[in-house]
Amino acid sequence: MIEMMIRFWSGVAGGVLLGLVIFGQAVFRPDHPAFECVTIGALTAGMLTLVRLAHRGQAIALVLGYIGLRIALAPMLRWSAAVSGVLLVLGIFGVALLYDLLARSGLRFGKFLVVGPLLGGVYLALAPITELDRMNVLNAASLLTFRLGLGTLIGEGVALGLELAELAGWKPRHRTY
């Protein structure tokens, strides 16, 4: 349990610290997209930690819980946000599986260099849905670029935090499935 918490909070700290470097205090403003460094950063840290520590059932429960929350909140927000959230958490789960696969193949350091672009790709693919009400011909390129960068930043920061915790001696115990 302590191992799990250290890894999780290391991932959250990595995402938030990298967000602070790029966005400054906007990371803590819920009305700014950089706030996702905190919210999606925590979700990603939780997913990577659970999958890496072989708690796949709990990771799937996290996916289902997040999907339920997004669907429950959809009438208060907009349906595109619910769809985007569902697809995002599924993408994060896929990225977590690949992160674990890289670690199991013997890659001790550098997985964050893969996780960042993968999460950035998920963000880029979802940008038209996420930005449905704001995107137009004039700002499409800048919004797509911003979403790609934001996803990459969150993925890099969270995965780097987890990797540093693992390198510091917090190694996962592998379970048989």
Image (cartoon, helix red, strand yellow):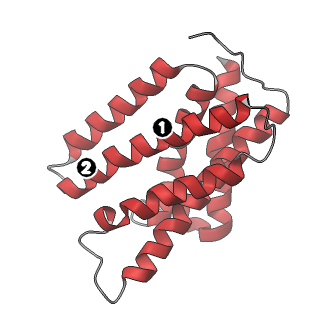
Residue matched to label 1 = 93
Task: Mark yes or no: residue 3 visible.
Answer: yes
Of all residues shown, which one is farthest toward the front?
105
Of all residues shown, which one is farthest toward the left?
75
Is 95 above or below relative to 168? below
- Residue type at numbered disc 1: Phe
Is 30 above or below relative to 58? below
Secondary structure of the residue carrying numbered label 2: helix
- Closer to the camera in the image, 91 or 15: 91
- Please report the residue visible at 60 percent of the width from the left and 52 percent of the height from the top: 155
Of all residues shown, which one is farthest toward the bottom?
138
- Please report the residue visible at 71 percent of the width from the left and 28 percent of the height from the top: 104
Image x and y of residue 30, in percent: 42, 59
Task: Check disc 1: other Cα within 10 Å, few if <14, some if 14-19, many if 20+.
Answer: many
Q: CA distance from mark 1 to mark 2?
A: 17 Å
- Residue type at numbered disc 2: Ala
Residue matched to label 2 = 82
Q: Which mark is residue 152?
A: none
